[in-house]
Amino acid sequence: MYLVSIRSAMRDWRKPAALARPRSASCSWAGLPITDIAFAAGFASGNIVGVWLEEKIAIGSLVVRIITSRENGILLARLRASGFAVTNIDAEGEGGQVDLLFTIVRRKELPKLTSLIRQYNPAATYTVEDVRFASSSVVSLATAKRPFALRRPHILRT
């Protein structure tokens, strides 16, 4: 929409008649190129601020799919030891047998999860998508509310 406004503003920019007569009788500013440019700038800046604010607030859940080679035991164990509920599925990829790991995390947990993936299996491929709805039973154990339980660090025995 704002591209159409910019195109019409650029097309009418050098026409003095466009400045003399408004396109709409209800507003004397309608039809001026500056209003089209202001609308486009406001629309674009609103989108930029909205995306930035959504990243800062980090509300919601994400599904993360991790594609690994068969040697993913350390990564899988570290993810579970860190409190992430992970589902492991055997699959076949272009290069042979692979494992698909699925987990649902809160947005705020994504940096921790991606750092674990990069640390324990840098060759893994992962994708991240928004989740519209997830039942409460799939919330990761890392941030599950346990009001009366003592939180002890998980110890991984290798």
Image (cartoon, rainbow, N blue to C red):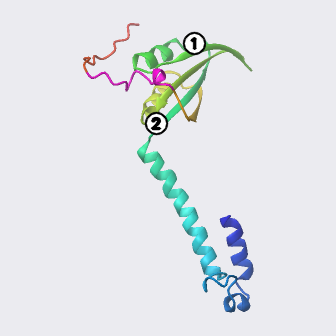
**Region in magenta:** 135-147
- Binning the other alpha carbons within 10 Å of mark 1 as few (below 14), some (14 to 19) or many (20 upward) gives few
**Residue at figure coordinates x 74%, y 79% from the top left:** 11
Residue 139 counted in the magenta span = yes
**Residue at figure coordinates x 27%, y 23% from the top left:** 147
Q: Quadrant of the C terminus?
A: top left
Residue 75 counted in the magenta span = no
Q: Secondary structure at mark 2?
A: helix
Q: Is residue 137 visible?
A: yes
Quarter of the image where one finds residue 111: top left
**Would you say 9 lies left or right of 142 here?**
right
- Binning the other alpha carbons within 10 Å of mark 2 as few (below 14), some (14 to 19) or many (20 upward) gives some
Q: Secondary structure at mark 1?
A: loop
**Would you say 125 lies left or right of 158 here?**
right
Residue farthest toward the top in the current orientation of the protein:
158
Three-letter residue code for mark 2: Arg
x then y, percent, for residue 43: 57, 64
Q: Name which of mark 1 and mark 2 comes first in the sequence.
A: 1
Query: Please, is residue 4 above or below residue 106 in the view?
Result: below
Mark identifier at residue 71 = 1
**Residue at figure coordinates x 55%, y 29% from the top left:** 63
- The tally of labels here is 2
The residue wearing badge 2 is 107
Three-letter residue code for mark 1: Glu
x then y, percent, for residue 77: 46, 13
**Residue at figure coordinates x 44%, y 40% from the top left:** 59
x then y, percent, for residue 97: 69, 13
Kindly report the secondary structure that dominates the magenta region of the rendered protein. Answer: loop
